[in-house]
Image (cartoon, rainbow, N blue to C red):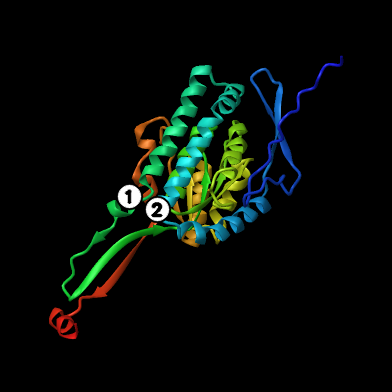
Amino acid sequence: MATRLEIQKTYKIYIGGQFPRTESGRFYPLKNKKGDIMANICQSSRKDFRNAVVAARGAFGGWSARAGFNRSQILYRIAEMLEGRKEQFISELILQGLTDKAANDEVSLSVDRLVYYAGWCDKYQAVFSSVNPVASSHFNFSVPEPTGVVAIIAPEESSLLGLVTVIAPVIAGGNSCIVLASESKPLCAVTFAEVLNSSDLPGGVVNILTGSSEELHSHFSSHMDVNALSYYRKNKNEIKTIKENASLNVKRIFIYDKLVLASDKAQSPYLIFDNQEIKTTWHPIENIGSAKAGY
């Protein structure tokens, strides 16, 4: 009997709830420590990023309008499905150089982090909203609202935990996003996209690209329909370019170059709040006597 050839997984990108290949047709070989090719990874282009922005903008309205408890249910469902595919993620992390224990710990922490943010979806508004004192006969309320489309350049050193850490607070707060996954450890990114796609998360809320930050960071920071950019790497030249581009289009940027992914500081309601805008509403106070007379 002939020796059976194992079918290798095809790693694509994730845009608008679908798994296209990059429009450029480019790819780069991903190698292990021995120099063996593990997979061919899509080299995303500027056009892929622009397509992802269109998908994210289209999904933002419906996702931001959902009740907090519903977003909470969906994040919890993502955690359930990640738990159910735990062994697959562990095997991919081991392929990318982690020990058995480190891979198991990373998947477990990723699941727990999703559950953490699922719990905050319907609570952060109460924490960060306020009733403000004013001198006139008005009520004055300040409440957080989603920023919009958020572009994210995920940590390079982490395949799964880095991805979950950057995505969960953004979508918990009602935003949509485009994420550039780790270039050297991209395997879990596409597999996590499969988890998102088979959960209840609407297509376009999360879009995941693979490829080079060196090529794409300037496009992430200069696109006029991106409202905010979060950068989780340590490249000083890229940070400089991002800040310069953002100053030209008044884009909100966050540089998390010192964040330790496995620490408690890597999960916080303040990471949700970073991608919120504060809306203040004035409402006149009715004359109590007139109201009673009218009643």
The residue at 74%/42% (across/down) is 26
> Could you tell whether 266 is left or right of 282 in the image?
right
| 143 versus 289 height, above or below | above
Q: Quadrant of the C terminus?
A: bottom left
Q: Give the x, y percent position of residue 52.
A: 61, 53
Q: Residue furthest front?
A: 295
Q: Quadrant of the N terminus?
A: top right
Query: Reading the chain from its start, which is encountered first: label 1 or label 2?
Result: 2
Q: Which residue is mark 2?
A: 68
Q: Give the x, y percent position of residue 280.
A: 31, 66
Q: Residue furthest left?
A: 289
Q: Which residue is mark 1?
A: 123
> Could you tell whether 276 is left or right of 197 in the image?
left
SS at mark 1 in the image: loop
Q: Residues within 10 Å of mark 2 (few under 14, many from 20)?
A: many
The residue at 29%/54% (across/down) is 126
Q: Residues within 10 Å of mark 1 (few under 14, many from 20)?
A: some
